[in-house]
Image: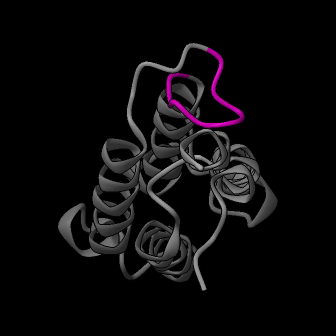
């Protein structure tokens, strides 16, 4: 079963906001890369979501396969960030968990928005 693009859009905006708030909610807002990596990932995810051609996109310039590729890359970067940026001894679980969720969601989401599939019928 594939995740509908509308559901993915809701998850995008929720995940972007969660990534931005996570350092303060989970107690790792120390001013270092462990804080700013998820904040930056959340801001970037919100930006490309706004520009994605799906039900919740506002500008609709980025095709869904490109959006899903960006999700997969962002998730992989989040997973690797604690070790690459050297904060794995402080915190790593939120980065890996959210990164893995992004990769899984990218893999299981429809590549064609629901409105386009209906139009094709």
Residue at left offset 24%, top offset 75%: 83
For residue 95, say whether it is visible.
Answer: yes
Q: How many marks?
A: 0
Up-down: is 38 above or below 99?
A: above
| Region of the chain picked out in magenta, as a range | 51-58
> Of 104 and 25, which appears nearest the observer?
104
Residue at left offset 52%, top offset 30%: 53
Up-down: is 76 above or below 70?
A: below
Q: Main secondary structure of the magenta part?
A: loop
For residue 91, say whether it is visible.
Answer: no
Residue at left offset 59%, top offset 33%: 46
Q: Residue furthest left?
A: 84
Q: Is residue 75 left or right of residue 42?
A: left
Q: Is residue 6 left or right of residue 71?
A: right
Up-down: is 109 above or below 70?
A: below
Instruction: Confirm whether the magenta stretch covers residue 54.
Output: yes
Residue at left offset 42%, top offset 19%: 61
Q: Residue furthest top?
A: 59
> Of 34 and 9, which appears nearest the observer?
9
Instruction: Confirm whether the magenta stretch covers residue 28.
Output: no
Position of the N terminus, as image quadrant, is: bottom right
Residue 50: where, in percent of width, then height? 59, 24
């Amino acid at each position: 079963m594939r995740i509908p693009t509308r559901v993915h859009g809701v998850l995008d905006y929720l995940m972007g906001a969660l990534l931005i708030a996570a350092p303060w909610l989970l107690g790792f807002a120390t001013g270092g890369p462990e804080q700013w990596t998820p904040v930056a990932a959340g801001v970037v995810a919100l930006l490309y979501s706004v520009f994605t051609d799906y039900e919740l996109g506002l500008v609709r310039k980025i095709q869904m396969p490109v959006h899903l590729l960006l999700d997969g890359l962002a998730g992989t970067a989040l997973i690797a960030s604690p070790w690459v940026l050297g904060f794995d001894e402080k915190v790593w679980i939120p980065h890996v968990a959210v990164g893995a969720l992004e990769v899984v969601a990218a893999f299981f989401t429809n590549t064609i928005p629901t409105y386009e599939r209906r139009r094709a019928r």
